[in-house]
Structures are given as C-alpha cells and as structure tokens.
Amino acid sequence: MTYYLTIVFLLIDPVYLSILSSFVGGGDMNGIVLIIPELAARLVFGVIVIMNSFVIIKYVAPLYRKAFLHKSKHRQTCEVLSK
C-alpha cells in the first residue's frame, strides 16, 4: 500500500499545481503567486511532474516490481512447504 502512496504523492500535487488549479481555482496557488508569477510556478511544477514521472518509470517501478515478485515467490514457497 505504501508503495502506491509514494507514487501518488509524487505526482498528484505537482499535477494539481501545474494544470488542475486553473480549473478548480484558488488553494495553494493563491499563496504561491504572492512569491513568484503564476506562469513561472506552473512551469516549475510542470517540470517537477516530468522529473517525478521519469524517476517513477525508470527507478521506482522496476524496484517495486522486483520486490513484489520476490514476495510472491516467497509466499508460494511458504504455502508449498506448509502443506
């Protein structure tokens, strides 16, 4: 479960701040525009989404896949041994 939460939280906030906040309005972007212009903030968060997506696809997903396959094989071995 925490594996999936990691992926969700790496993507959901930057996606909201770069794209969705213009349709939903307000929220965090109101405070951010007090510091930097809105377009700059959207671009920065867009870059963060791209970088996080790359990290997830290149590094996180293969590690999760490997961990789950190992856990699945271990579980099957335990079930066979317990019979």
Image (cartoon, helix red, strand yellow):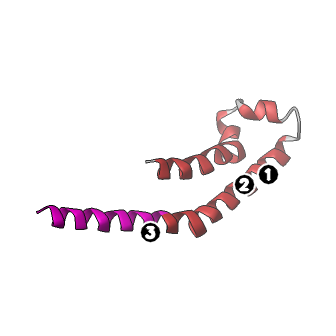
Quadrant of the rendered image containing residue 33? top right
The mark lying in front, picked from 2 and 3, is 3
Looking at the rendered structure, the kind of residue marked 3 is Lys
Q: Position of residue 3 (x, y in %)?
A: 48, 52
Element type at marker 3? helix
Element type at marker 1? helix
What residue is disc 3 on?
66
Q: Is residue 48 left or right of residue 63?
A: right
Q: Is residue 66 left or right of residue 36?
A: left
Circle 3/circle 1 CB separation < 8 Å: no
Distance, label 2 to label 3, CA atoms, is 26 Å
Q: Is residue 58 left or right of residue 81?
A: right
Looking at the rendered structure, the kind of residue marked 1 is Val
In the image, residue 46 lies in the stretch drawn in magenta: no
Residue in the image at 51% along x and 47% along y: 5
Residue in the image at 76% along x and 35% along y: 29
Circle 2/circle 1 CB separation < 8 Å: yes
What residue is disc 1 on?
44
Looking at the rendered structure, the kind of residue marked 2 is Ile
Element type at marker 2? helix
Of mark 2 and mark 3, the one earlier in the sequence is 2
Q: Position of residue 4 (x, y in %)?
A: 48, 51
Is 40 situated above or below 68?
above
What residue is disc 2 on?
48
User: Magenta part of the protein: which range?
Assistant: 64-83
Mark 3 Cα shell of 10 Å, populated few (<14), some (14-19), many (≥20): few
Q: Position of residue 32 (x, y in %)?
A: 81, 35
